[in-house]
Image (spheres, helix red, strand yellow):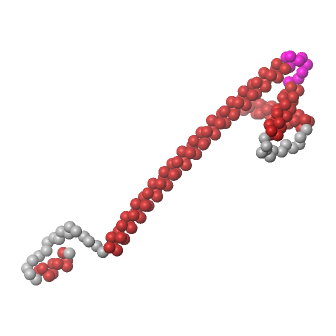
């Protein structure tokens, strides 16, 4: 404004020192473009904030799932420990009640009973699609032997680690 008006006003003896613009009324296209720029900037900030919020939610969900898995694992470990202690007491009582019985034979019998109970439970479910192969009582004894060997090997490893 100052540049445009300085020359014509100087012909009349006036000098323009400063111009104060209080109302700007640009073309409608300019207004629309400026509004689009502002909208785009706000949408970009909103998208960034939304992304950060989703990231925080996913991290918190993953942390909750991890903690739930840990607690679930501790629960299963406690359950198995109670089962082992109960089986140990049952085997000891069985051997005490029937002198000459070996603990390994009692465990074979317990494994066979659990195997039969498992088959019964699977068979009771109408939507079951589990297949056990091979299926014979002799294989259950083999399975029992494998479990015992694994337990003894784990005990040996634990003892070796404690010695170090």
Horizontal and vertical percent position of residue 25: 26, 71
Q: Nearer the viewer, residue 128 or 118?
A: 128
Taking 55 as reference, is 101 above or below it? above
Q: Residue at x 82, y 19 (%)?
A: 93
Left or right: 132 in relation to 21: right
Taking 97 as reference, is 114 above or below it? below
Left or right: 131 in relation to 63: right
Is residue 104 in view?
A: no
Left or right: 138 in relation to 56: right
Q: Nearer the viewer, residue 163 or 11?
A: 11
Which span is picked out in magenta?
Answer: 95-104
Quadrant containing the C terminus is top right
Q: Residue at x 43, y 61 (%)?
A: 43
Horizontal and vertical percent position of residue 105: 88, 27
Quadrant containing the N terminus is bottom left
Quick check: is 98 in the magenta stretch?
yes
Instruction: Name the image quarter holding residue 26.
Output: bottom left
Q: Residue at x 78, y 41 (%)?
A: 125
Is residue 134 in view?
A: yes
Q: Residue at x 66, y 33 (%)?
A: 75
């Amino acid at each position: 404004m100052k540049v445009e008006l300085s020359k014509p006003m100087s012909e009349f003896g006036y000098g323009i020192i400063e111009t104060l613009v209080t109302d700007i009324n640009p073309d409608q296209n300019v207004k629309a473009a400026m509004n689009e720029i502002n909208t785009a900037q706000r949408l970009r900030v909103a998208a960034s904030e939304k992304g950060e919020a989703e990231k925080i939610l996913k991290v918190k969900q993953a942390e909750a799932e991890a903690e739930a898995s840990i607690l679930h694992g501790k629960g299963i470990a406690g359950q198995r420990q109670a089962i082992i202690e109960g089986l140990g007491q049952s085997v000891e009582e069985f051997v005490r009640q029937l002198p000459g019985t070996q603990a390994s034979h009692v465990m074979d019998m317990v494994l066979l009973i659990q195997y039969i109970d498992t088959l019964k439970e699977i068979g009771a479910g109408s939507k079951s699609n589990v297949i056990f192969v091979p299926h014979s009582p002799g294989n259950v004894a083999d399975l029992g032997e494998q479990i015992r060997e694994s337990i003894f090997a784990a005990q040996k490893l634990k003892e070796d680690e404690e010695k170090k």
